[in-house]
Amino acid sequence: MDELTAEVVVAGAGPTGLMLANELALAGVDVLVLERMHERTGLSKALNLQPRTAEILDLRGLLGRAEDRSFATVADGHFSVIPVSYTGWDTRHPYQLGIPQAEVEAALEERLAEQGVRVRRGHELTGFSQDAEGVTITAGGIRVRAAYLVGCDGGRSAVRKALNLRFEGIEGRGHGVSADVLFESPPPGAPTKWRSMANMVTSKSPGKFVGIIPLAEPNLYRVTFGDRLNRPRNLRAEVTDDEVREAVHERFGPEAKLAKIRWASRFSDDSRLAARYRVGRVFLAGDAAHIHFPAGGQGLNLGIQDAMNLGWKLAAELHNQAPPTLLDTYEAERREVAKQVLDNIAAQNALVPLNENQRALRALFRTLTELPEVEHHLSGMISGLSIRYETKETHPAAGARLPDFPTPEGHASDVFHKGKFVLLTTTPTPPPHPHPEVVVAKVPKLPWPDLTRILVRPDGYVANTTGATTGWLTT
Ligand SMILES: Cc1cc2nc3c(=O)[nH]c(=O)nc-3n(C[C@H](O)[C@H](O)[C@H](O)COP(=O)(O)OP(=O)(O)OC[C@H]3O[C@@H](n4cnc5c(N)ncnc54)[C@H](O)[C@@H]3O)c2cc1C
């Protein structure tokens, strides 16, 4: 058995693991990525990047790569398939980027390779043990000794199971199927470009739904359908062509001609959250920590943002720059965000009309979403733009995301490319900041006009409005 060492082992090269590995590599951490699969499948569950994810990719100069691989810009998001506009938000990216999950992974893996880190494929984590100094991981013929292990190994996470953590939540009643279907010609009435969430999903009978999204290739569509009330006995049972054909014909009639079903897969509407995100030297991130029905397109986005939150904290700890409680803020911050997402998914589920009362409630709710404040609240949740982390300060900037803004040199986001803390200051001659982990940038003004300086964390959230590093960095 080969014996290896690393500072951090990331189990799983999905979007969460790849983003985390990128963050660690950027901070100079020796990271090893172990992936069970011998090669990428090229299949995509998720199809979108939400505005906040676009912003954080921009903080690392990665957004352009995603844009190059995207196939659509979708003006709005949705809450229980009721479109909600993102235009009321102070962001340069008030839309969803239509991009297959496989392309997000490819872009992240490409950057990772440029940073000198290769994914070790065909290495399934099968066990680990931890002690005071580190973790020993066994995976497909190798044994690795590392300071930390992060389970980014998806909803059926072996890391989470080995930690014996409760994975609590709601057991759903229904199921869904996602399939990429090539048609002979666009189905009658189907859009040929994905520009809005409006009318993407319809329901003919209570609990049943069919959604369709045009993909990059002509006549290729993502068809998603299911039944919120009835679940097959075996959720892992293969999807039959007849099932897909029946759903398509129910929505578009028999004149919709299917040429080929490229792939199809079943998913559940269970919602679960790991009881803890950290046990000693082992962490969970992404689907390993939370699963839910893919309503609103949030799961991949949540995972990438988990990674963005954990990466710089782990790096600070490894570089002896982290105050004692910093690593624990990962669970405190990100578990709370996941809880809110699971709640919004539950609320979206409650708006699915299964009877006459719920139909009336949904109609009323739809009217309420036309109120700008309601739409803003909902779009903030779905887009990730309203996330803020608790701080002791009461100023509205503290703990909030830094909205990007133009500077004489470009944009404020450019200063974050190195993954360090950023001190933004409007004072004429900013003092050179003594801390090597802090980049100082002089800007003409800040998004909060009453402030003259703010310290921003590497993940783009305002640490404080004083610029002090106390509580964030040790020296
Ligand atoms: C039908 C469907 C549609 C969806 N649509 C959207 C959407 O539009 N928008 C959105 O944001 N989200 C969506 N999601 C959710 C999104 O796909 C997931 O949240 C996302 O894949 C999570 O990424 P991850 O990296 O955490 O986990 P995964 O993508 O599951 O990656 C885990 C990786 O770990 C590997 N692995 C597993 N076990 C081991 C092991 N023991 N050792 C080593 N490697 C291992 C796996 O092979 C895999 O590569 C959808 C989900 C489904 C099911």
Image (cartoon, rainbow, N blue to C red):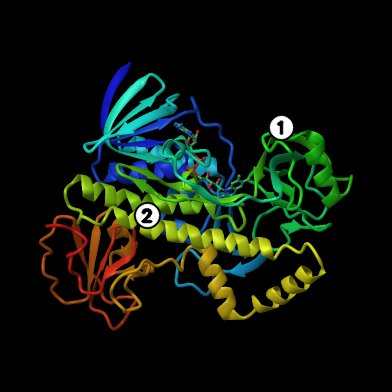
Q: Is residue 61 visible?
A: no
Task: Identify residue for label 1.
Answer: 238
Q: Quadrant of the C terminus?
A: bottom left
Is disc 2 placed on a helix, strand or loop?
A: helix
Q: Position of residue 474 (x, y in %)?
A: 15, 57
Q: Is residue 35 rendered to the left or right of residue 457?
A: right
| Frontmost residue, 437 versus 267 | 267
Residue type highlighted by circle 1? Glu
Identify the residue at the far bottom of this view: 450
Q: Which residue is mark 2?
A: 331
In the rendered image of this protein, does residue 278 appear above or below residue 96?
above
Q: Examine the image and state in which quarter residue 231 appears.
A: top right
Query: Label 2 crowding class (10 Å Cα cut-off): few <14, some 14-19, many 20+?
Result: some
Nearest to the observer: residue 396 or residue 252 = 396
Q: Earlier in the sequence, mark 2 or mark 1?
A: 1
Mark 2 or 1: in front is 2
Amino acid type at image mark 2? Glu
